[in-house]
Amino acid sequence: MLLEIVIVRHGQSEGNRDQVFTGHSPSPLTELGRRQAEATAERISLRPVDLIYASDLPRAMQTAEPLVGRTGAPFVTDAALRERDIGELTGMTFAELEAQRPDIWKAIMARDPSFRPPGGESSVDCRARVGAFLDGLFSRHEAGRIVIFTHGIAINQMLYHLMALVPEVMPPVVFQIENCSVQRIERRSDGTRRIACINDTAHLATLAIARSGTVP
């Protein structure tokens, strides 16, 4: 028996395009983001889908909608799949933060896993949240194909969780997770969890792929 979990980053959002810290803000998809979502749905729907989850933030739900429409699979939103909460930084551009609060900018760029922006979450907090969600999926489902629509930093933290890295120690690797990229996780009958692919964007080959500028 095989459980396959397909993890998709949302399509390009207005915040991605404008290099804004979006965190838990709405930041809907751009026109490119909507086309990315359609292309992603076309690819994933080539095989049956049993269940679809999405962060309850609009950019993730909007990215999930084309796949829900194509497959008719049950669709569940969950706040546990939200992006890292960056608190008072929400709505600031990267350039504004670097110029106005260089101390906070340096802490973010240093990727200190315990650093919490004012009113926000640390990377440790984010990993605990998304890791608990993944563990719940593994405990509730023995087999099938589940698709998750979430966010760039959240996906990095999911992958670190799957690799059983120490949360309080920032690993020396940051995964590049493009908008609407696909990550595939498999759990085999012997219990082995296999990361089958990361940042697969083959289905977006005919679309422009814009670097999001996300700061994990």
Image (spheres, grey):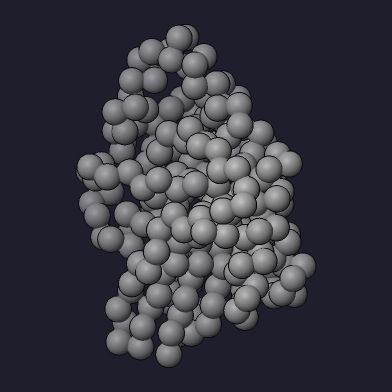
Asked whether residue 39 is in view, the answer is yes
The quarter of the picture where the C terminus appears is: top left
Q: Quarter-wise, where is residue 75 in the image? A: bottom right
Residue 88 is left or right of residue 105, and the answer is right
Q: Is residue 60 above or below residue 95?
A: below
Q: Is residue 164 above or below residue 186?
A: above
Question: Where residue 181 appears, x then y in whole percent?
Answer: 51, 54
* Residue at the image point whose x is 32% and y is 82% from the top: 191
The residue lying furthest to the top in this view is 100
Residue 148 is left or right of residue 107, and the answer is right
Q: Front-most of 70 and 159?
A: 70
The quarter of the picture where the N terminus appears is: bottom left
Asked whether residue 135 is in view, the answer is no
* Residue at the image point whose x is 49% and y is 46% from the top: 178
Q: Quarter-wise, where is residue 188 in the image? A: bottom left
Question: Where residue 91 appears, x then y in whole percent?
Answer: 60, 25
Q: Front-most of 111 and 212?
A: 212
Q: Quarter-wise, where is residue 112 in the image? A: top left
* Residue at the image point whose x is 57% and y is 27% from the top: 20
Q: Front-most of 64 and 30?
A: 30
* Residue at the image point whose x is 66% and y is 64% from the top: 41
